[in-house]
Structure formats: structure tokens, C-alpha cells
Amino acid sequence: RAKRYMDYREMLEKEKGIDAVLIATPDHLHAPIALAAMRAGKHVYVQKPLAYSVHETRVLARVARETKVVTQMGNQGHSMEGTRRVRELVQSGVLG
């Protein structure tokens, strides 16, 4: 029963109650949608590639800091508990 939208801007405007968005659209739309979502105060998980230029990534980082939303870029295979556990082991010094 989820509402369907053809335009992310319409969804962000109408769906005030959502807390976060997952962006898995064609690559060229990742940065613009992430930017719009952050500016709307939504937390963002965006599939790789995050952006196509250093400028786009810097803008996204600045807006994430300004809006204080949680952001993550990843791919489906690296968002699981096992990957987080390996990171913890490396950071703790157990593995190097």
C-alpha cells in the first residue's frame, strides 16, 4: 500500500512524515536526490557512486553537516553486520 511517485521532489514535498530515504536510482541522480533529501531534513543512505565530481561530494558533505542528518554511502554487500564487525576488529588493533 505504499504510495508511488515518479518524481522524488513530489515525494519529499508530500511525505513530511518520512525520516530517511534510500537512494538506488540511476547513478546520475544520486547526488541531486541526496542533496534534496538532506535539505528536506531526511537522513540519507545512497548507493555508490555517491557523486560524479569532487565538487558534488563537497557540497553533499557541507549540507550534511549543516542539516545534521545521518548519511551513508555504500553498496548492499557492505552494509551488513559482518562488515561492521571487521571494521571494529581492525580499529581495535586485533587485526592490522
Image: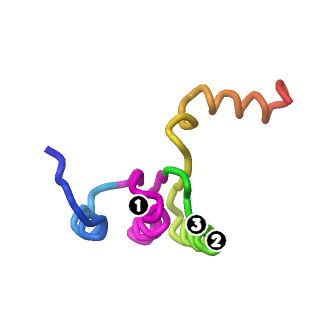
43 horizontally vs 55: left or right? left
Helix, strand or loop under label 1: loop
- Which residue is painted at 30% across and 55% down in the image? 18
Q: Horizontal placement of 36 versus 73: left or right?
A: left
| Secondary structure of residue under mark 2 | helix
Task: For marks 1 and 2, give the CA distance.
Answer: 18 Å
| Numbered disc in front, either 3 or 2 | 3
Looking at the rendered structure, the kind of residue marked 2 is Arg
Residues at marks 1 and 3 touching, judged by CB atoms closer than 8 Å: no
- Quadrant in the rendering for residue 49: bottom right
How packed is label 3: few (under 14 Cα within 10 Å), some, or many (20 or more)? few
Q: Which residue is mark 1?
A: 42
Q: Nearer the viewer, mark 1 or mark 2?
A: 2
Q: Which residue is mark 2?
A: 58
- State which tag comes first along the sequence, 3 or 2: 3
Helix, strand or loop under label 3: loop
Task: Look at label 1 and name its amino acid.
Answer: Lys
Range covered by the magenta-colored residues: 19-46
**Distance Cα–Cα, label 3 vs label 2:** 11 Å
Q: Residue at x 66, y 70 (%)?
A: 54
Q: Is residue 20 magenta?
A: yes
Q: Is residue 38 left or right of residue 5?
A: right
